[in-house]
Image (cartoon, rainbow, N blue to C red):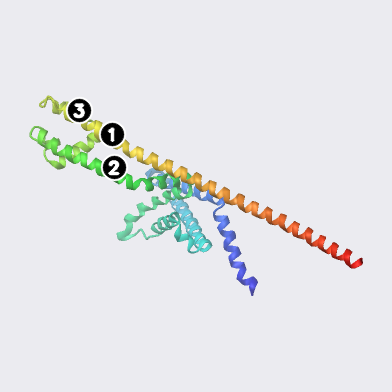
Amino acid sequence: MARAQTTPVSFRTRLADFLESSPAQTGIIALILVNAVIFGLETIPPVMAAIGPVLYALDHAILMVFVVEIAARLFAFGSRFFRDPWSVFDLAVIGIALLPATGSLSALRALRVMRVLRLVSAMPALRSVVDALLRAMPAMGSVAALLALVLYVGAVIATKLFGATHPEWFGDLGRSLLTLFQILTLEGWADIMRDVAEQHRFAWLFFVPFVLIATFAVLNLVVAVIVDSMQSGVRAAVAEEEEERDAELRRELDHDLGDVLREIRKDLAELKASVSSGQSKG
């Protein structure tokens, strides 16, 4: 009876170790990359005309492998599976791929390519980058609010200054916001400024400071926030690794100390036994 109870636990542990092993993870990454290539080939009509059924068969086979892998992880990890955000992400991506892509849901067939995003969860380096981006979201929200404020103020000023002479760009607040967003990306901003300057001699006094403030100052804050978040993540990872290493050293020391203490107790017991034997003989 006891043996029957311990066998499933042992099998789940071995299965979890296998799923987290390097060969298994490498195999999943290879299948994701192959699947990505298949999705790309499906967009080329001559390729689909030649080997379309083969590509569909490979796609379905790879999907089945992913389904089996997710089921195995659910069995091996149990409730721990849902406490890992990346595991839940994998489950959602595979679930979307299993939705029927016929009738009114035919548009969902394009969402199959989301399976390629599993590469993020399968590669620790990509996971660390995404984690850094998520940690930077609150600070990036503040930078986005600042950028929106700069755009709004600039759009109001541009509409009042240039709306009458250049309505195609600054005729109303919406057009001014769109034009300034284009200038924010540095796409053709010099041509717009030269065109406006033909009728507004000092237009550069608006455009140049706007580019300097919005593009070179505010947008660079986004980069600074992401870099700082990634550095914080690296420091946290290093600290966690050091804690794990210290804990492992403490466990080894405790184990070695336990062995020494057992040897001392054994020697004391033997010494006590020999002393007792000598006294009894005397």
Q: Nearer the viewer, residue 140 or 50?
A: 140
Mark 2 to mark 3: distance in Å?
Answer: 28 Å
Badge number at residue 217:
1
Q: Is residue 108 left or right of residue 10?
A: left
Amino acid type, mark 3:
Asp
Which of labels 2 and 3 is toward the front?
A: 2
Residue 256 x/y as whole percent: 68, 53
Q: Quadrant of residue 162?
A: top left
Q: In the image, what residue occupies the spot 59% across and 67% down?
A: 8
Amino acid type, mark 2:
Val
Say few, some or many: other residues with alpha carbon within 10 Å of mark 2 (under 14 / 14 to 19 / 20 or more).
some
Determine whether 188 is above or below 66 in the image: above
Q: Which residue is mark 3?
A: 191
Q: Which residue is mark 2?
A: 143
Q: Nearer the viewer, residue 214 or 246?
A: 246
Q: Nearer the viewer, residue 59 or 265?
A: 265
Badge number at residue 34:
none
Q: Earlier in the sequence, mark 2 or mark 1?
A: 2
Looking at the image, do the residues carrying marks 2 and 3 touch, with CB atoms under 8 Å apart?
no
Say few, some or many: other residues with alpha carbon within 10 Å of mark 1 (under 14 / 14 to 19 / 20 or more).
few
Q: Is residue 103 left or right of residue 166?
A: right
Q: Is residue 91 left or right of residue 203?
A: right
Amino acid type, mark 1:
Ala
Residue 270 x/y as whole percent: 81, 61
* Residue at the extreme left: 164
Determine whether 114 is above or below 143 in the image: below
Q: Secondary structure at mark 2?
A: helix
Considering the image in quadrants, where does the C terminus appear? bottom right
Mark 1 to mark 3: distance in Å?
Answer: 22 Å
Can the viewer see residue 151?
Answer: yes
Q: In the image, what residue occupies the spot 32% across and 39% down?
A: 222
Q: Earlier in the sequence, mark 2 or mark 3?
A: 2
